[in-house]
Image: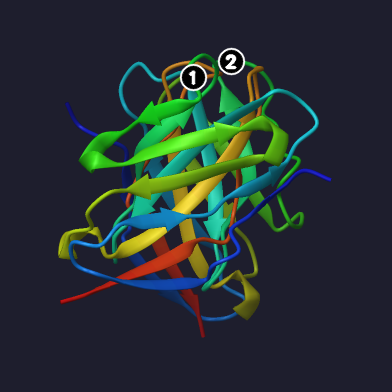
Amino acid sequence: AQSVTQPDIHITVSEGASLELRCNYSYGATPYLFWYVQSPGQGLQLLLKYFSGDTLVQGIKGFEAEFKRSQSSFNLRKPSVHWSDAAEYFCAVGAFRAGTALIFGKGTTLSVSS
Amino acid sequence: GAGVSQSPSNKVTEKGKDVELRCDPISGHTALYWYRQRLGQGLEFLIYFQGNSAPDKSGLPSDRFSAERTGESVSTLTIQRTQQEDSAVYLCASSPQALGEQYFGPGTRLTVT
């Protein structure tokens, strides 16, 4: 079955500390991977995407993610977290073909402590 | 340019009533998606429109749910005879092509009392 798992429901990190949010997927086709961020009361904003090429992708707001095919993972990282990064983060997977909706994980809520 | 817009932002309705939710995609985006986000859950795909092709309705949870889109413009999601389990945030997304990343609107929060 196609699915996305985000094992951590809630993570708290100190401001300035590094961050890694985990994402594992199960997908029958070549995956097209995304990370989105959702601030309270807001829609989803695309942080970064991976389709092919370099397995380390850079996104907005200083985020990066690494695709590891052998582990079926696409973990999101940031070297130094800011208080404004507190939000909910969603990993999603889709196929590179027409008409495919994204499959989303249940999200990880990030809290940032001072 | 303008992003995806949705209206209303909030809707409270009584059980059994019909509701219509509207989505204005980014101009020129051919693909449009509707998702549902229940509290504490990820996004569930509902329906997909691509240009003038027949929509993919495979995610609609029941025949009470329907959606329309005229060409590459506005889409309306209709829920008939609403139930309490329909309470959720309904998100619309558009994409410049069938394979591109999706740009999301702010959502409509539906509460069925």
How far apart, in angstroms, are the residues tagged by discs 2 and 1? 6 Å
Q: Quadrant of the N terminus of chain A?
A: top right
Label 1 element class = loop
Is residue A93 placed above or below B38 in the rendered structure?
A: above
Q: Which residue is mark 2?
A: B52
Q: Is residue B56 left or right of residue A28?
A: left
Q: Where on the picture, by quarter, is residue A60?
A: top left
Residue B79 visible in the displayed image: yes
Q: Which residue is mark 1?
A: B71
Percent of width and height locating residue A75: 50, 46
Q: Where on the picture, by quarter, is residue A63?
A: top left
- Return the mark for residue A16: none
Mark sitting earlier along the chain (2/1): 2
Percent of width and height locating residue A44: 37, 48
Q: Is residue A93 left or right of residue A91?
A: right
Tell which of A82 and B84 is nearer to you. A82
Question: Are the two marked residues, 2 and 1, in contact with CB atoms closer than 8 angstroms?
Answer: yes
Is residue B63 placed above or below A113 in the rendered structure?
A: above
- Amino acid type of the residue tagged 1 in the rendering: Gly
Percent of width and height locating residue A91: 52, 47
Is residue A32 placed above or below B51 in the rendered structure?
A: below
Q: Is residue B15 left or right of residue A38?
A: right
